[in-house]
Image (spheres, rainbow, N blue to C red):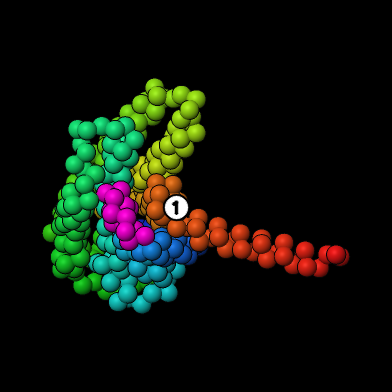
Amino acid sequence: MTSDSSNTSVAPCVINNQMEAFTYFYYLIFLIGIIGSFVALWAFISQRKSRKSLNIFLLNLLTADFLLTLALPFKIAVDLGIAPWSLKIFHCQFTACLIYINMYSSIIFLGFVSMDRYIQLSGSLRFQRIQEPGFAKMISVAIWCVVLFLMVPNMVIPTKTIDQKPLLGCAEIKTTLGLHWHVLTNFICMAIFMNASVMILTSNFLLVKKLYANKGPEVQRDVRQSLRHIFILTAMYIICFVPYHIVRTPYTLSQYKPVKNCALQRSLFLAKESTLLLAVLNLCFDPILYFYLCKSFRSKITETFGSSKATRSQKKIAVEEGSSPT
């Protein structure tokens, strides 16, 4: 009787089972994202003569997207339950970190994209140095250094050795030092998110205000186009990143000091996974962002696919004219 009660009291709380539903969405995001990223890379390479600061920030955003495409197949395999034990450990220690490298580098670069757009469209002279290509490259290097400084220790801090089991939570293999660093980076990343959010929302608000103030009949079309671009950037940012950061801190703290209520643990985990899925959606949204914000990218896409469409139309007209009676 005592043995039965002790077995019941130590029954594990399983929170990461039944993950298959998420994998279908990740698989779709991976396919759309990798196609869009390769098309974007081809368009940017074809327009190498363009060296604007905005293009530099967008190219760095594209680099972050490619890191995410490297990580998603591993996450899909682990969540499906088909990954061997060694791959689960590798994912927890390395490829899972690539997702967060993509997330926070993307957030920061989107902040500078918004600021760059504000400076460009408002004609402000106070921050024009940001639009210099050399300065944009220096900022980009600094951003990567900060993000890698935060995330790489999560990859290199030694992990614990535990017995193999069907389901693995990444926090289970972290040492005390690893958990402390994980919690610390959570709060630093929250600060990065808050500052980038202020940068994006303030830049876009000031730009909308200025555009509405200068809205005249002769520039109405350009104003509408600029407002549409601002809305796309803001909506993409809010959809992808705001929900995740609402639930990230409670979930991280629950890993550091496990919650005794199993239902609450599972709710926090599912909330984290659902909002992480939204964050990964930036892989699909970014090519749309490149098209609307980068003129050289848009002109290359339009020139290539628009010309092929025109060629097909001309061939169709020629065939119809050739088959019609004279």
Q: Does 59 appear in magenta?
A: yes
Note whether 168 is above or below 197 in the view shown.
below
SS under mark 1: helix
* Residue at the extreme front of the image, as rendered: 326
Q: Write down the region rendered in magenta.
A: 47-62
The answer to which quarter of the image holds residue 10 is: bottom left
| Secondary structure mainly formed by the magenta segment | helix
Residue 278 location, x and y as percent? 42, 50
Residue drawn 50% across the image and 61% down it: 304
Seen in the image, is 33 located left or right of residue 245?
A: right
Q: Which residue is mark 1?
A: 298
Pick whichever, 193 or 141, lies toward us.
141
Residue drawn 15% across the image and 65% down it: 157
Q: Can residue 271 be spotted in the picture? A: no
* Residue at the extreme left of the image, as rendered: 177
Residue drawn 31% across the image and 64% down it: 67
